[in-house]
Amino acid sequence: MRVLALTGLKGGVGKTAAAVNLAALSVADGHRTLVWDLDAQGAATHCFRLRPKLKGGAEKLFGGDRELRAAVKGTEHPDLDLVPADVSLRNADVMLAGARKPTRLVRRLLGGAGRRYDVVVIDCAPGLGAVAEAVVAVADLLLVPVIPAPLGLRAFERFSEFVVAEAGSAQLLAPFLSLVDRRKPLHRRLEAEVAGDRRFLRASVPVSSAVERLGEEQVPTVEAAPRSLAAVAYRSLWSEVSERAELR
């Protein structure tokens, strides 16, 4: 089983759209896939047409009273399941920090579901806290969407420092540019600069109306608009992720 986490310091960077589309591409490649929506906003849950309701709430899950597999819901996509989010996840950092061994707890939850899945895609809430610490410890790859703007790049560097402090290395990191608007000179300039940074994946996801419709259509972009520039970018991104995570 490979654990791929969509994470980072900033919100509004296309994190959930990437999680949904990469999960769909994982299934298309023949991998049994689980999406774990760890963001209280429940955007990934919504995109898969499920209710943002976690039975027993985060209290049961992070209190060690419930197995992750008991929270799994099927989606309309064969071989793609989801652990839904709900509003109780807003306190997930506090609850996990209060656990005796939070990283071991998250690893146990994943291990209980792991026998059924080849890939787990975790859609994390933005920020640094106990959940982020645990995800850094259990993930095989940390996918970080970065907007090509000075503050976006600064937020990534801060997150990179956090990962190095927690994991002792930046090797887990797989940042990629997101919401790229090549009509903007700044975006073009920073995209060219990032091209020389070996930490970054080569694929970059453009600003796209096809992605913006994801929340309304509730269908992954790679299926709803397979010829769109964004869908092409997600397929390129998945190809790099699969190689780096040794899924091929």
Image (tube, rainbow, N blue to C red):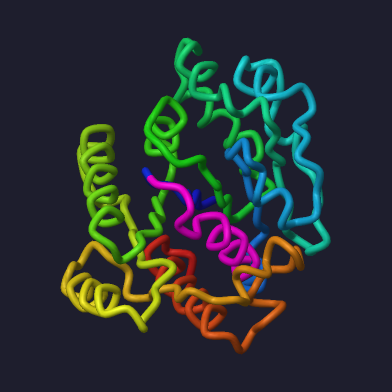
- Look at 65% across and 56% down and name the residue there: 33
Q: Can you tell which quarter of the image residue 204 is in?
A: bottom left
Q: Can you tell which quarter of the image residue 202 is in?
A: bottom left
* Spot occupied by residue 79 in the image (x, y as percentages of width and height): 75, 60
Decide: is 97 above or below 13: above
- Look at 63% across and 17% down and name the residue there: 64
* Spot occupied by residue 111 in the image (x, y as percentages of width and height): 58, 36
View extreme (front): residue: 184
- Look at 26% across and 37% down and name the residue there: 162
Q: In the depicted view, which residue is nearer to us: 13 or 233?
A: 13
* Spot occupied by residue 105 in the image (x, y as percentages of width and height): 53, 23
* Magenta stretch, residue numbers: 10-26
* Spot occupied by residue 206 in the image (x, y as percentages of width and height): 45, 76
Q: In the depicted view, which residue is nearer to us: 34 or 153?
A: 153
View extreme (bottom): residue: 227
Decide: is 103 above or below 65: below
Q: Is residue 6 magenta?
A: no
- Look at 21% across and 33% down and name the residue there: 165
Q: Left or right: 176 with respect to 26?
A: left
Decide: is 27 above or below 167: below
Q: In the depicted view, which residue is nearer to us: 12 or 65?
A: 12
Q: Is residue 13 magenta?
A: yes
Magenta span: chief secondary structure: helix
Q: How many marks?
A: 0
